[in-house]
Image: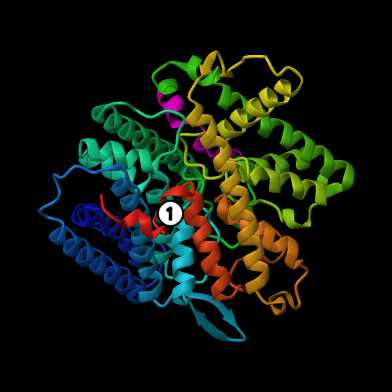
Amino acid sequence: MNFKLISYILGIISLIVGGFMTASLPWSHPFFGQVDTFDWRGFAGTLGAVLVSVLVGSLLLFIGRDARRDRLLRREALAAVALAWLLATILGSLPFLFSGTARARENGRIVRMSVFDAIFESASGYSGTGASVLSDLEDPDLVPRSVLFWRSETHFLGGLGIVVLFVAVLGMGSAGKQLMRAEVAAPSQTSTHEQTRRAAIAFGSVFVTLNIILTALLLIQGLSLFDALCHAFGTIATGGFSTYNDSIAHFKSPAIELTITVFMFLGCTNFALLYFAAKGNLYRLLYDVEFRVYAAIIFVSTLVTAAYLFFEYPDYQYNPLTALRYSLFQCVSMQTNTGFATADFDKWPPFAKGVLLVLMYIGGCAGSTSCAVKVIRYIFLFKILALELEQTYRPNVVRVVRIGQQPVTDADLLKSILVYFAMILLVSVVSWLALLAFEPLSTWNGTHGNKLIDCLSAVAATLNGVGPGLGLVGPTANYGALHAPAKCILTTLMLLGRLELFPLLVILNPRFWRGR
């Protein structure tokens, strides 16, 4: 294992994180309209985090200075990606800690964020989960505006992909290809170093362009620059952090809801297809199998949920148009793993909540900012199952799995699909049981939640990068009531979901670090 080369890569990542942190500093000044007087607490806390990031980055670069041109092997790429996300999460938690950000005000007493709280919030931002321990985002005495902006900015960094950004800017030849393989899971990979760098640049270009367009549209619809940027970061990265306690419901605007719905949908569409569509090749987008299934799932789930809301609650609150409005937003929000809310869906009928829970485990398209399993894997899974079912009564039949018109002859790819589903199931069940074991029942005293269901939804919401779950962790609540062991479990799930399990799991194996 070339630890010096890994150190060099981590050093660059630290400097990137520190550089992006500086963009949150201006929001401490009254000139930008978020504070009445200069916010020294938020400014000093964020600046301290910037200095620590630069210091750590400089030290790591110094350690790895002799290895920067060494060849990066697959094992080292996996280690670099996993450690980069862990390091970024730790550095990203520093503004919360240094500024004394508070997660709640209880009985007149301000409760500061603990180390576990800060790491949870940072991991949630980078992974695009949107789960939070903060109970009052609108009180600058609890959450400084510069820290609130940094909180949303972690969505931008995580959605763009810290390592993808690194590859796009610095290239690194064969090392860039290995890093992209470890960072971005997709059915196929680019074959040359230059193609890898071009793919990273194209991904970044689409991501940044969507952020700019959405920010402009939100500004036109009356949002401040601060709110427009924060909600654009949360939408395109399918993260879900808002600057208001009521999330998107705060605006009480169908136009804003529809705008964000469209861009959540685009944020979970394969960015390669959006890139070709922007260049005039709409055919590749509209006739892509995964995109059509993705759109069909949203369409059907929206209609079914809207119909159920209307017939279950045939009153003024859920007339056909209102039911369609709420169900469209929440179905898109859940499937794209964004986690924004316009209604308290925790009060919806069990069937409607069940639909949303299923959508959490589906996700968007490969090559997007979505976490979760992704639609393409389900397409593969159902085709594999259909083929196996047919072979039970036609044992001599010889067929191949096809995606569109393309036959899939790679047996390792089909095996990896089944292994991934098995791993998702295993991680979900083990994590659910761990939450049930470690989180005391007293946490639910005085709440309307159910420990069994709430823990299950918390696992689904964090592993799949959604954010809000049900009951105790529902859309009008947060994760602040949970104890430290539960927060550690859920933090791990957020990073596992963002990295698609394997890069983070393999570094826990001692044999992974032996030899080269």
Depicted 16 relative to depicted 178: above or below: below
Residue 84 position within the rendered picture, expressed as x and y whole percent measured from the top left = 33, 55
Residue 211 position within the rendered picture, expressed as x and y whole percent measured from the top left = 42, 41
Q: Nearer the viewer, residue 414 or 164?
A: 414
Q: Nearer the viewer, residue 306 or 91?
A: 91
Q: Quadrant of residue 56?
A: bottom left
Depicted 218 relative to depicted 366: above or below: below
Horizontal side, residue 28 vs residue 402: left or right? left
Q: Residues within 10 Å of mark 1 (few under 14, many from 20)?
A: many
Q: Nearer the viewer, residue 90 or 187?
A: 187
Q: Quadrant of residue 335?
A: top right
Q: Which residues are magenta?
A: 258-275
Residue 286 position within the rendered picture, expressed as x and y whole percent measured from the top left = 55, 19
Q: Nearer the viewer, residue 384 or 475?
A: 384
Question: What residue is at 39 percent from the left and 61 percent from the top?
Answer: 89
Question: What residue is at 27 percent from the left and 72 percent from the top?
Answer: 48
| Amino acid at dot 1 | Leu
Residue picked out by circle 1? 504
Residue 203 in view in this figure: yes
* Residue furthest to the left: 66
Magenta stretch, main secondary structure class: helix
Residue 95 position within the rendered picture, expressed as x and y whole percent measured from the top left = 36, 69
Q: Is residue 272 magenta?
A: yes
